[in-house]
Amino acid sequence: MSNPVPIPASSPAVSPLDSFAGEIVPARLGALYRLGLAVVALSMVLLPLIYVGLIALAAWGVVLHLRYDTWLVSGATGRSAIYGLIAYLGPVVAGSILLFFMVKPFFAAKARVPDPITLDPAREPLLFAFVRRICELVGAQSPSRIDVDCDVNASASLSRGILSRKLVLTIGLPLASGLNMQQFAGVLAHEFGHFAQGAGMRLTYIIRRINFWFARVVFERDAWDIKLDEMARDTDFRLGIFLHAARGCVWLTRRILWALMHAGHLISCFMLRQMEYDADRYEAKLAGSDAFESTALRLRLLGVATQVAYDDVRQSWTSRRLPENLPLLIDHKAASLPREVTEKISAATSTQKTGWRDTHPCDSDRVQAVRRLNESGVFRRTEPAAQLFSDFAELSRVVTRHTYEKHFELEFTNENLMSAEEILRESAASTEADKMIGKFFGAVNVSLAPALVEVESRSVEDQERAVLENQWREARRTTKWLRAEMEKQSNRWNELRQRKTELTSAYRLARAGFRVEPGKFGLPEAATSAGEQERASQMELTHVVADLADVRAGLEPFMEAMRLRVTLALRLAAASPDPAAEKILADLGPVHRQVSAEMAGLHELSSELPAFVLLAQNHDHHANPGDVEREMSKLAEEMQEVTAGIQGRLKPLAYPFPHARGPLTVAEFARPDAASSSRWEQAFSETNSHIEKLFALNFRLIGRILALADAAEKKLNASQQNEEEAKEEEKVDAAPRGTA
């Protein structure tokens, strides 16, 4: 264990550099551990050598054929000479192709990675000093530079490969915004703990690089692979035989490499897990065993929050708006996660098991191992880790912009960026919408809901109010009683819609003359010709459409009760006017009614669009591309006719939310942001834009309206409770009094 001394109180007046109390006793690596690591590294090096041996064996086979099979072209004349020459040169061609594909991975260019954002030590003196102090305690070399990005991760790596003596520390800014100093210091100690293992880290570097290289060899496909497939399919069958043979050899070689890759993975996994356990000990020694456990859960929550935040980014980009500060948004999302979500994440983490093929132990095993260490730690400051940076907010904005430009490759200006205040407001509204839809609808698909708002402006008389309140209570009871069964019906509807999408694709492909795999599209195995598949898919589509209508009809009682519940709650609340709520409802109501009416057409488009994409992707693979173009033209006309109708109906409505382009109509919002270069791209872009934007808008509108309905219901519940309490008081007042 580490030997801590009393730690200075957490106070802004005390520098974090003065809060490290005590030293860390380095974790000793046993001789058996080092020997095992060396054996694993040696085994991993042997695997690529086996691959080189396969290349040499293939080359030797070609040479032997050229040397000893000359009899195929000796003494032959006429047509026999031609066939003999093909038989002699064919294996040479196939073997040469095989050798090319086997050697190609050695020279494949690395994927280009955007240049990182590197911090200036002069501008971040506290952070660099903090990192150096951790390195001193852990016994690792200080990094030569510190890079930052928007990942929920931190990593330390060799800057220029295994021979490099310089380390690079990469810090994900969401860690700094989402962790306190103690947790953040522990994460850094873990990363540098790997490098405290000395030669072990370099051996690990070898292991990881070889595993990555094998994955590239086995799974990577490029233009050469596609060209070989096309040549084998389109070339004269006499030469095609050898090209197909080359493809078969390439496939067999990759299967062998697949086996070697998995063998290497299994060999290396145990030692990689041990290295993680060893790095965990450094984290516990620095931050304490209790902090390790809280950090593990916090990292899980930040990971989920990141997914939610990026969903928000995608949705906001439909309005050409982007949060200017991703770390801030992620931190807000983590703080806004519902309690049941955090409980599920915690429960799932505690029940995880480490598998043989895992390179990292599961969190529960790591926590148990750290608990046994019972380390108190030497650094326990709990202020936000963002305070270690000189201007964290500005740095977050810079890194966020870099992420959009270099990683997402988005084109935007400063006008597209939302301020921090807007981010939090939009994030809170999005969280509230999710919460409200979950509260009212559960897992029922809200795109099936009718217009929820039919509010009458006239006042409600007292006598009428009692009747309406009873109707509201009955509607609320009905929705709650039906919801569980309706969730099942909604899931069934979703499954049927997916089935409809698959059958629509099969039908359109068959109409264009393609023969599809029956099993892939759920068609009878006996349907092998394009005509048979067209008839089979059309017949099955008829049944699926009928089933969808039946399920939709089964959902109607719930949907009608929900519409009545929301409408009555808002109408009854109007008796006590709230100008802000009335303004929101006046803006959103007409848009919601029309957008909800467009959902059926959008569902049809979402079933047709995948078929259009499949036709475009397979256009060049058809013997008669003109047949494909005719079917694409017909489908494009049908989709554009639907989108044109939607445009006409949405044109009079103003878009009710802020937009980077300023005031615009809902029709303008639904259109694609950029013009397309071809009619096919235009048809796809228009349809896809309407589907993505209007489904998202419908969800957002329903969430906002349900938030108003929820507030109205709370008032009604409070009013009902007050009335009941008043009646109870009247009973008490009317009861006979006792005498003293």
Image (cartoon, helix red, strand yellow):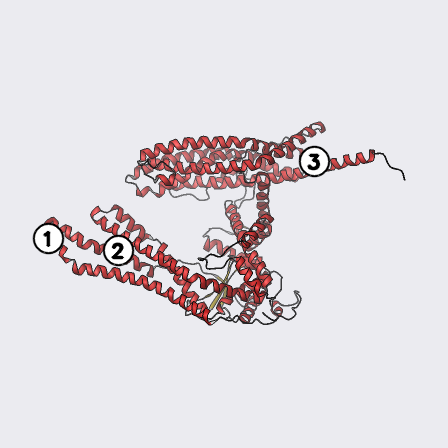
Q: Is residue 617 left or right of residue 465?
A: left
Count how many numbered circles sit on residues in the image: 3
In this rendering, the label closer to the viewer, 2 or 3: 2
Give the residue displayed 51% in from the left and 70% down from the top: 142
- Whether residue 652 is visible here, answered yes or no, is no
Can you say whether 665 is above or below 381 in the image? above
- Whether residue 203 is visible here, answered yes or no, is yes
Q: CA distance from mark 2 to mark 3?
A: 81 Å
Quarter of the image for residue 662 reads top right
Residue that mark 3 sits on: 576
Quarter of the image for residue 640 reads top left
Q: Nearer the viewer, residue 634 or 7?
A: 7
Q: Earlier in the sequence, mark 2 or mark 1?
A: 1
Find residue 587 and report its horizontal and vertical position in percent.
Answer: 59, 37
Q: CA distance from mark 2 to mark 1?
A: 27 Å
Discs 2, 3 touching: Cβ within 8 Å: no
Q: Earlier in the sequence, mark 1 or mark 3?
A: 1
Look at the numbered disc 1 and give the secondary structure of its residue. loop
- Under mark 3, the amino acid is Ser
Crowding near the residue tagged with mark 3, few <14, some 14–19, many ≥20 C-alpha atoms within 10 Å? few
Residue that mark 2 sits on: 97
Look at the numbered disc 3 and give the secondary structure of its residue. loop
- Under mark 1, the amino acid is Ala
Residue that mark 1 sits on: 76
Q: Nearer the viewer, residue 59 or 612?
A: 59
Q: Nearer the viewer, residue 103 or 555?
A: 555
Q: Nearer the viewer, residue 275 or 341?
A: 275
In this rendering, the label closer to the viewer, 2 or 1: 1
Can you say whether 319 is above or below 18 in the image? above
What quarter of the picture does the N terminus occupy? Answer: bottom right
Find residue 34 and report its horizontal and vertical position in percent.
Answer: 45, 70
Find residue 60 and report its horizontal and vertical position in percent.
Answer: 23, 62
